[in-house]
Amino acid sequence: MDQVRELLAKFNSRFHSTPKVYRAPGRVNLIGEHTDYNEGFVLPAAIGFSCWVAIAPRDDRKLALYSENFDEFVEAELDYLKPHASGKWADYPLGVAWALEQAGNRLRGANIYILGEVPLGAGLSSSAALEVAAGFALMHLAQHAITLKELAVLCQHAENEFAGARCGIMDQFVACHGRAGNAMLLDCRSLDSKLLPLPPKVRLVICNTMVKHNIGSSEYNVRRQECEEGVRQLSKVLPEIRALRDVSLADLENNRGLLNDLIYKRCRHVVTENARTRAAAAALQSGEVAALRQLMADPHRSLRDDCEVSCPELDIMVDLAMRQPGVLGARMNGGGFGGCKINLVNAADSDQFRERAAQGYRAATGQRPDIYVSEASEGVAIAEPG
Ligand code: GLA
């Protein structure tokens, strides 16, 4: 049975009605990490794993949500939603309902069945996939129009204000706008984006360290505060800057004396990462895929040493990958502190890569990694039975 038919049947046996089904994808980020909340550049792609949401209206103003992944049922009244982080999965759909209503969209009560196939806590944006799928579904049900840009921004707002993670816009934006076969260069200040076709014979191979990451954890928010502190100090001599996006490497080096070592390193990561991201986008666009290898290796070092968001397991995986044939690039992916590594691998080498990476990781850490092979995929959509 296909995924949609299966969900229709499961929904029916729980809520005794026929729903509509929506899906939104997780993502990988090829380069541009911890730059989105600094109004910089990112280069993500949507992946072939989605969060699925089946929804049907109710006569009252209640949301009744069931998560298959957590086998948990939660109810909430639309009229009494208010930001509070419980740290649970329901913060995301409830947060989005809250944000949509705050923005003037009166929603309908609904029964909702959620099935997430994006691995949880693996740095593949399972939470953004859930937010975007739920937001899209709730707006359709209430017959309100919304642009995908507006939806992405409101989902980010929900995660910042309701769920308490001060994430940037990357994950929600690509869950909305992803396109099959393409990565996307996104300017996180203007929200202008450009699709960049990935070479057809290249696979996205995602290796999971199995170390769970949680971006609601205080370390992610601390990184953001450290970058803001950098802007505060630098703006004493560079009053025109608004975010690290506006700072050049020369500005940073000339004013290094204003920053303590830690803040300087954080700023250096962001400033150099923005430059690398634009260079990687240019390399993809002109078909110089060989240049990606170095462009992806440098950010891993910068994320490890300057941003300090890697972990020994990610470093081991990147070292292992760089020794395999057919690897066009490998680096940690997402917020860090565990989660997944992304590899761009020639399709012809991807089976062998998978085997060797798993063996090597097991020998080094005793852990069996999950490895997923994906193509770049489509953003949020309604799903019809196949
Ligand atoms: C998480 C956040 C994103 C981004 C990345 C790091 O995925 O949700 O907004 O900041 O970390 O690049």
Image (spheres, rainbow, N blue to C red):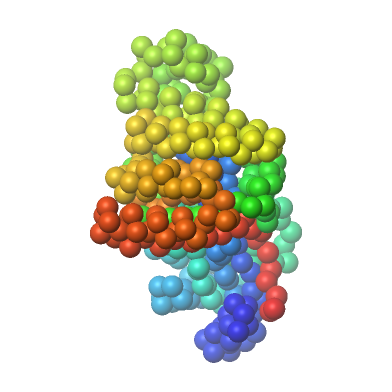
Identify which residue, 174 or 61, lies in the foreground: 174
Residue at image position (29%, 45%) is: 312
Asked whether, in this view, residue 279 is left or right of residue 322, the answer is right
Q: Quadrant of the C terminus?
A: bottom right
Q: Up-down: is 359 above or below 174?
A: below
Q: Quadrant of the N terminus?
A: bottom right
Asked whether, in this view, residue 179 is left or right of residue 81, the answer is right
Tally the numbered discs. 0
Identify which residue, 102 or 209, lies in the foreground: 209
Residue at image position (37%, 22%) is: 264
Asked whether, in this view, residue 281 is left or right of residue 359, the answer is right
Q: Up-down: is 209 above or below 73?
A: above
Identify which residue, 205 or 172, lies in the foreground: 205
Q: Up-down: is 210 above or below 182?
A: below
Question: Residue 21 sits in which quadrant?
Answer: bottom right
Residue 353: % across, % down: 46, 55
Residue 232: % across, % down: 43, 22
Residue at image position (52%, 57%) is: 350
Residue 315: % across, % down: 34, 43
Q: Up-down: is 263 above or below 372?
A: above
Q: Is residue 290 visible?
A: yes
Residue 28: % across, % down: 53, 51
Asked whether, in this view, residue 86 is left or right of residue 76, the answer is left
Identify which residue, 142 or 265, lies in the foreground: 265
Residue at image position (55%, 75%) is: 112
Q: Is residue 135 visible?
A: no
